[in-house]
Amino acid sequence: MSTSVLLVDDHEVVRKGIRSLLMLTDDFEVVGEAGGGAQAIELARELAPDLIVIDLMMPDVDGVEAIRAIKGLSPRSAIAVLTSTDQDDLAFAAIEAGAQSLLFKSMLGDELLATLRRIAGGEAVIHPFVAQRILKAVRRKREPREDPFACLTERELEVLRKLAEGGSNARIAAALNIGEKTVKSHLGNVLAKLHLADRTEAVAFAWRRGLMSAESEHGG
């Protein structure tokens, strides 16, 4: 029996390419196509296909939301993400939402076809590049979390926090009752210790690593 397939991608040329590839075989049958997540959810409910090949970046309902909804409607459908994005957060979110496999659009035709056959046969296939990143992320979670600001003095933390709040050197100096030259000196130390290139990177680092949401922890 052939494997019924639902193709989901907002680019028609991508869907056409995959459909043409699958039509060359006797073991796949494309039963539906969707140009967005909302349509994919409705077709998955209606068709309950054996395999859904879906992109993550779509204009209406994104791939992750669609995957989560589809798994609730058609839990028997195997879901293979086929994407061009290399964003770890999206890849991990797709797997957590219920995708069994994650592939890249850069895969050549024969390789993609062979991989889809493995997925249709019940395997979970993660592209090696993504698998490596998943392993690294898991290992990072297991490692004790270190304070990224531990190398800074209390004064340097205060200066960085004021900078992240949008303060200029003059405003930081006034707020902390120190001279502008001292502010520059502290900022220079912050950049050097955190291995950052400029003020913009310092602001982004402070927000991304939680300094602004953990003021009490750092003496604020």
Image (cartoon, rainbow, N blue to C red):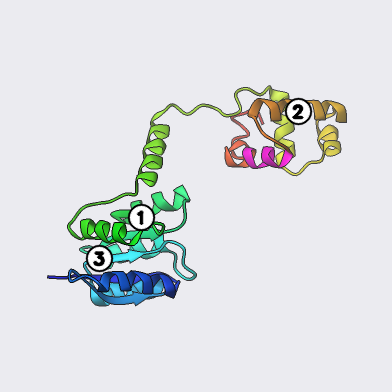
- The quarter of the picture where the C terminus appears is top right
Cα–Cα gap, marks 1 and 2 = 43 Å
Q: Residue at x 62, y 38 (%)?
A: 205
User: Which amino acid does the dot numbered 2 rest on?
Assistant: Gly
Q: SS at mark 3?
A: strand
Q: Secondary structure at mark 1?
A: strand
Residue nearer the viewer, 12 or 208: 12
For the N terminus, give its image quadrant: bottom left
Q: Which residue is mark 1?
A: 103
Residue pointed to by mark 2: 188
Q: Nearer the viewer, residue 174 or 120?
A: 120
The three-letter amino acid code for the residue at tag 1 is Leu
58 vs 160, left or right, is left
- Mark 2 → mark 3, Cα distance in angstroms: 55 Å
Marks 1 and 2, the one that precedes in the sequence: 1
Contact between marks 1 and 2 (CB within 8 A): the answer is: no
Residue at 37%, 65% in the rendered image = 66
Residue 36, x across and y down, in percent: 42, 72
In the picture, residue 120 is in which quadrant? bottom left
Specify which label sits upstream in the sequence, 1 or 3: 3
The Cα–Cα distance between marks 1 and 3, rounded to whole angstroms, is 14 Å
Which disc is residue 51 wearing?
3
